[in-house]
Amino acid sequence: MIDRSDLDRIFYLVAVALITAGVYLSSFYSYILFHSLVEIATIAIGFTLFILAWNTRRIVPNGCIHLIGVGYAFAAFIDLFHTLAYKGINVFPHSTANLPTQLWIAARYLQGATLCLAPLFTRRRVNDTATFLGYSGALLGFAVTLATGHFPDCFIEGKGLTPFKVASEYVIIGMIGLALVLFYRRREEFDRQVFLYIVCSLGGTALSELSFTAYLSVYGFSNLLGHLLKLAAFYLIYRALLATGLTHPYLLIFRELKAAEQALRRERELLEERVAERTRELRTSQEKYRVLFQSAYDAVFIHEVLADGTPGPFIEVNDAACNLLGYRREELARLSPLQIDEPERRDKIFSVMQALARNGQAAFETVQVAKDGRKIPVEVSTCLTEIEGKKLIFSLVRDVTQRREAEESLRRLTDLLEERVRERTRELEEKNEELERLNRLFVGRELRMAELKEQLAKLQGSDALEHA
């Protein structure tokens, strides 16, 4: 079943087709009638675009619409005189086909310049005074050059189009091409349907100008085709700026708001993506911290500092802390460092708190009392930090029982070694004394033997002298 909107669309297309066919068929009856109908329709569209642009200039931030409305109105004003000066109308009895052709070129130059300038104002408003002064100056310049005969000839009876007219058509086509490029670069500023209408209108205008480069008679087929294409181009720009604007006003009037909403949506999606990514990073970091915290060999205690400067209950402890003191995690959550230490060592805890307040960190050795009364020698490294307005103390507690036992064993071994060294020294000293005594005895004996040998030698000498 065809719904209401499809029926309206079909009826609309049929109506446009019938009107176009009727305009075309009028050319068989009278080309002047056909030309007048086409020009009157385009002139009406031009002035209608001006009415839309002028009455919405305060609320539509897109200056492109305003500039097209004003520019097409001035071009339509020149087209009005082009229609009245057309050959066969006889409003200007002494004019030839050259005058309407000159007026046509003047209007198309103005239209081409408007289409080139319009995309430059898609994000800003236009100054009404400067716009009217500019277009009025251009219109006055065309009028003066036409009245004084300084505007180049565009059509010569019996010869057809002049080189200036043909070259001008190609220049205007180039201007339309430039406008198409500029509109394409700013396509994001327009609704997709509006942009499509504008592109088709520019294409129809370019084809219209191309057809006007080849006719020999102002009543010829090329001239007829050019006017039909012009009518289509004006109708498409009408659909883009007026019909679409009235049917769906937000497409034009609230285009900036829609673009801002889309930009905001993109920023929100980007922000959500960044938040999700950051959340994943935080979860990964938190998991790493949890694994490190729970798998640490040393006991870790985290507790808050109360308003009076005393340590509050433990906020978090790891498994090593529970194993060290013999408490369950739920039990430690209700206790503070003051409650798990001996009363006589609480002064030391207060001195540590004062040191933390001054320096933010401290290291010391103490004896920690376990739940079962065991006294455990520990080495403590602690620091004071502030997180979200709360003062927290992080303490790393290491059981040094084995180290103390090892130190004690080393001390005992050292003492034993020193004792053995002393005993060995005494033994060596005694042996040295014995050796010295024996050495003295040996040296004495050697001296006596030397004396005996000397005395024997002397006796043997005296005997020899007596026998001689």
Image (spheres, rainbow, N blue to C red):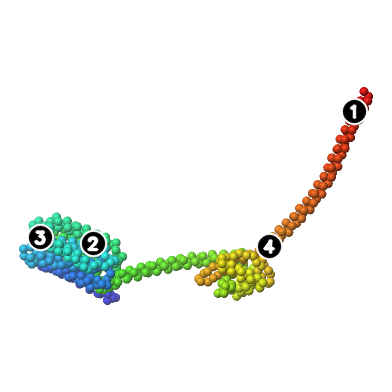
Q: How far apart are the alpha carbons under marks 1 and 2?
A: 153 Å
Which residue does the numbered mark 4 point to in the structure image? 404
Marks 3,4: beta carbons within 8 A: no
Badge 1 or badge 3: first in the primary sequence: 3
The residue drawn where x is 89% and y is 35% is: 452
Which residue does the numbered mark 3 point to in the structure image? 148
Q: How far apart are the alpha carbons under marks 3 and 4?
A: 117 Å
Marks 4,1: beta carbons within 8 A: no
- Disc nearest the viewer among 1 and 2: 1
Q: How far apart are the alpha carbons under marks 4 and 2?
A: 91 Å
Where is residue 145 drawn, in percent x and y? 12, 60
Amino acid under disc 3: Thr
Which residue does the numbered mark 2 point to in the structure image? 116
Q: Does 355 sit above or below residue 428?
A: below
Q: Determine whether the residue tagged by mark 1 lies in a helix, strand or loop.
A: helix
Amino acid under disc 4: Arg
Q: Is residue 6 visible?
A: no
- Viewer-side residue, 169 vs 461: 461
- Viewer-side residue, 25 vs 385: 385
Marks 1,2: beta carbons within 8 A: no
